[in-house]
Image: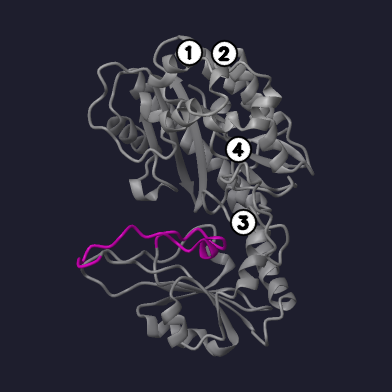
Amino acid sequence: MPDVVTDIEKLYPAHVERYRKLYEDVLSSCNSDGMEGFVISSGTVKTAFLDDHPYPFKTNPHFKSWLPVIDNDQSFLVIKPGQRPLLLFHQPRDYWHQSPDDPQGFWVDQFEIRTVAMLDDALTAMGNTASLIFIGEENDLAQAWGFGQINPEHILNAVHYERAYKTDYEIACLQLANDQAVRGHRAAESAFRTHQSEFDIQHAYLGTIRHREHQTPYSSIVALNEHCAVLHYQHYDLSPPPEIHSMLIDAGANYNGYAADVTRTYAFKDDEFQALIDSLDEQQRALVGDISIGVSYVELHRQMHLRLANLLREFRFVDMTPESMVELGLTFTFLPHGLGHFLGLQTHDVGGHQATPGGHQQPPPEAWPALRLTRPIEDRQVFTIEPGLYFIPMLLNELKQSEHASSVNWPRVEEFIPYGGIRIEDNVAIIDESPFNLTRHAFETLGP
């Protein structure tokens, strides 16, 4: 398969046209009670309780689905059928902070743009708000301004469902985000090899991708040794442990508002843990190779557990047939999270459980409640594939108390507890009905 085209300037007009048509179709098909268009808010900066310091700003994903403005609060998009989208771009009169520069770049020609200094200026420019649907977090403001509808569920369901199908521009942004993330992962591995701390590895990563911490799509997981067994490990030790065994880094990057979500695991020595990483990596690649149009993601998740069961038997952790391990739930002890999730404007992108545009949900199976994606695989989707194998003391203790404890080689398991665990995560796009691994492509093409 050829490389992903990443000429975003050429791809962007078709992207805007797709979203314009999507919103027009949603407006006409969702029984919108005479509504004539939409106002989409970029979001509002929030101040910490009893303080004058703001929390990091996160743009409304519905706003940044239209344009790559991801750091400007109190801006609004006005979308009306048959009219050019209107951007009300917030430029406050403020000598305490630097005001945003005038809008510029490849995207500006697609919009009518007016700068507004105050919220009242934006309200005046919107016109008759009673005939408009508001999409954003500022419910009180939207009510005060008299919008006809505010975040109607049927509208959001329809848009969320369609966001699963990415435009060429979106796939290009996701590839470029993966390119950034992979550069950071290489820097992080180098820091790990020189015995640096979690804190220092994280800053090596951020310095390479040129992001401040709040600009990443999610907080990086940088875990050494037994910390690798904490699925969402949230700290950065300032000093390295006396002896380093392993590192798990789950860290992404942002490009024009689109998220990369990449995980790699490393052994400090070429030991049995490295062999286990290599074997899981082989299974992860095979899972990506199993992807085909129409296959349920739930079935792919089940295949992952069968592959994991084979590894548990091969490495002498559990003496049981792979099929029995999955049926009896033993593999859950070693892999309690889902295979992956949709990826796009959000790290865990919306619509993963939606069965229809109307909002009907297909929940995950009872045995795998953490699975975030249950839809069948279709063209233009982008999702993660992230199998893992963990030695989590809490879950292992529960297994030790169960009727299946005798099937586990406990001395063997305990040898691996100091390593924590393994996760390998790639971002996969379905292009022309075939899987294209955005993450592996970045690792293979960016050089050492």
Residue occupying the far front of the picture: 403
Residue that mark 1 sits on: 412
Could you tell me which secondary element the residue under label 2 belongs to? loop
Residue that mark 2 sits on: 315
Residue type highlighted by circle 2: Phe
Residue that mark 3 sits on: 12
Residue type highlighted by circle 3: Tyr
Q: Nearer the viewer, mark 2 or mark 3?
A: 2
Vertical position of residue 303 compared to residue 360: above or below: above
Tell me the magenta residue range.
49-71
Could you tell me which secondary element the residue under label 4 belongs to? loop
Could you tell me which secondary element the residue under label 3 belongs to? helix
Residue type highlighted by circle 4: Leu
Q: CA distance from mark 2 to mark 3?
A: 49 Å
Task: Residue at 35% x, 18% y: name it.
Answer: 193
Residue that mark 4 sits on: 339
Q: Is residue 100 visible?
A: yes
Residue type highlighted by circle 1: Arg
**Residue 61 inside the magenta-drawn segment:** yes
